[in-house]
Amino acid sequence: MSTERQLLEVAERSYPPPPRAFDALVRTRRRRERNRRTATTVLALVLAAGAAWLAVHGFLGPSAAPRPGSKVPSGLGPEAASHLGLAWYGSIGGVSAPPVVADGMVFAGTSDRRLYAFSAGCGSNGRPCAPAWTGTVGGGIQYSSPAVGGGLVLVGAGDGVLYAFPQSCGSDGATCRPRWTFRAGASLADSSPLVRGDVAYVAADRVYAVALATGKLLWTGPGRALTSTFGMTAPAASGGSVFVATVEGALEALPESCGVTRCRPSWTASLGATPTSQPVVADGLVYVGAGRRLYAFADT
């Protein structure tokens, strides 16, 4: 027997372990494990509560909430919306159609025969803001919302002319001239233009397709009167087709790539009543209201 083993046996006889020492050791280890699990659970609850608080109040706390006149986050969730305040306002003529926002600019057509362009961030603290530029047209703009594309702002007016102004044509209240104009056969005060690629579409007595860069006529649809109440003459387009509603109670589709000057519909649906809305295309269906019905057409 080695000397080390003998010494251990002597120590064990001289200092016997207390009664039930093993059971006490087991209980101690169990208590430590239970405390560790409790601490882990409490830490997880604290972290979860902190994450929830940050989701509601933001990483910088309530002091980061926007004050009246300050810049508001683009998301405009419930928390941000509850702190909205007037940033700026511009004095213009009567506005009936929704303005259009594009590339940091706001465009609005008015009944005083003008197109106004404002910088979206042109003011703060509720102060008045002057337009960056204005364009004069030959007729009132009622329910025609501007359209933006190809560096141009398009708007229809009551004189039956589609006006195309350079999107960045001036600043400091400049008066701008249109790059080109196109005359339709009827008023465009209620018709919002549509830009698709390098072509602009507008509807009045018929559908007109014009080159976006030059305003040159590409083709027209058949001479049918289109619904013209509250901007309902605005066409819709999807999948290579342009859709319009007529006062005769029809929904028509014309090919965007029509190869002739006078384009004929590739598809027509009878609605049985005068349409009461402009067509809308979404998720492969074409919707239009007529009479007391909402119609949805799909590829069959």
Image: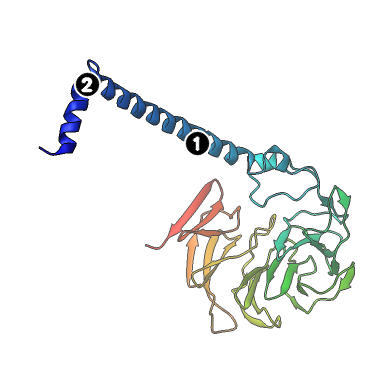
Residue 192's disc number: none
Which residue: 67% across, 76% down? 150
Which quarter shows the C terminus?
bottom left
Q: Quadrant of residue 250?
A: bottom right
Asked if residue 65 can be seen in this view, the reply is: no
Which quarter shows the N terminus?
top left
Say what secondary structure mark 1 lies in.
Answer: helix
Report the colour scheme.
rainbow
The mark tally for this picture is 2
Q: Amino acid at mark 1?
A: Ala
Is the residue 213 above or below the residue 132 in the image? Answer: below
Most extreme residue toward the top is: 19
Q: Are there few (<14), some (14-19), or many (20+) residues within 10 Å of tag 2? A: few
Is the residue 297 above or below the residue 49 in the image? Answer: below
Q: Position of residue 259 (x, y in %)?
A: 54, 84
Between 142 and 145, the residue placed more toward the observer is 145
Q: Position of residue 223 (x, y in %)?
A: 62, 72
- Distance from the alpha carbon under mark 2 to that under mark 1: 55 Å
Between 81 and 293, the residue placed more toward the observer is 81
Q: Amino acid at mark 2?
A: Ser
Say what secondary structure mark 2 lies in.
Answer: helix
Q: Position of residue 268 (x, y in %)?
A: 49, 66
Between 70 and 96, the residue placed more toward the observer is 70
Residue 14's disc number: 2
Q: Quadrant of residue 58?
A: top right
Sequence-first tag of 2 and 1: 2
Mark 1 — residue? Answer: 48
